[in-house]
Amino acid sequence: MASILIIAASDGNNLKLAEIIKEKGEEMGNQMSILDLCAVDFPLFTNARAKATETLEGLSEVMAQMAAVDSWFVVAPEYNGSFPSILNNTIAWLSREGDDFRDLFNSRKVGLGTHSGSDGIYVIVAMRQLFSYLGCNVLGRTLRTSYSKPANPDTIVAMLGELEK
């Protein structure tokens, strides 16, 4: 049994996908939770705002939630060939916390998924590059869904199995 956090970078179909993943993970005996980045709703990160903000409300809670689990399953839609700004914005705010924010990411297992209007390959590639750069161990297998291609339960189970190890 593992504790897995699903990080949803959309409050639409990717949040629904996060719920499907959560349900599968719980059926497998894992402790599952969802971090809905849209509900957190941090302000846009800028250097000026960061300097003027001693403590960003909710940031320490997000960081604690991310640190408290064994692995993450990140789901995000494809926006203009990349990931949504809410994901990058959250990581930008996290990057100013603590002495070495990369401790949160180093060696963390991460699964990647998407529900996108297209096949979602670009968001997967962009997230793979981002999380690899931050020091995460990104699974090779990914979950890609669209309006015409529902989530494959076998893929979800296989990926959760890898995140359990």
Image (cartoon, grey):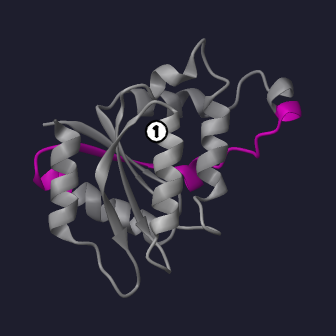
Residue found at the far top of this picture? 99
Asked whether 20 or 129 is in front, the reply is: 129
Which residue is depicted at the point 11% across and 45% down?
A: 29
Does residue 32 appear to the left or right of 58 in the view shown?
Answer: left
Q: Is residue 74 above or below residue 63?
A: below
Which residue is depicted at the point 74% across and 45% down?
A: 43
Q: Is residue 128 above or below residue 96?
A: below
Asked whether 52 or 46 is in front, the reply is: 46
Residue 89 figure quarter: top right
Q: Is residue 79 above or below residue 162?
A: below
Query: Horizontal and vertical percent for residue 148?
Result: 36, 88
Residue 37 is a magenta residue: yes
Does residue 5 appear to the left or right of 45 in the view shown?
Answer: left
Q: Where does the magenta region start and end?
A: 24-49
Q: Quadrant of the N terminus?
A: top left
Does residue 98 appear to the left or right of 8 in the view shown?
Answer: right
Q: Look at the image and tell me whether residue 76 can be seen.
A: no
Q: Is residue 40 above or below residue 76?
A: above
Q: Residues within 10 Å of mark 1 (few under 14, many from 20)?
A: some
The number of numbered discs placed on residues in the rendered structure image is 1
Query: Horizontal and vertical percent for residue 156?
Result: 22, 60
Which residue is depicted at the point 67% across and 24% down?
A: 96
Residue 25 is a magenta residue: yes
Residue type pointed to by label 1: Ser
Which residue in the structure is indicated by mark 1?
A: 132
Query: Horizontal and vertical percent for residue 71?
Result: 31, 37
Which residue is depicted at the point 46% across and 70% down?
A: 120
Q: Look at the image and tell me whether residue 8 can be seen.
A: yes
Mark 1 falls on what kind of element?
helix
Residue 142 figure quarter: bottom left
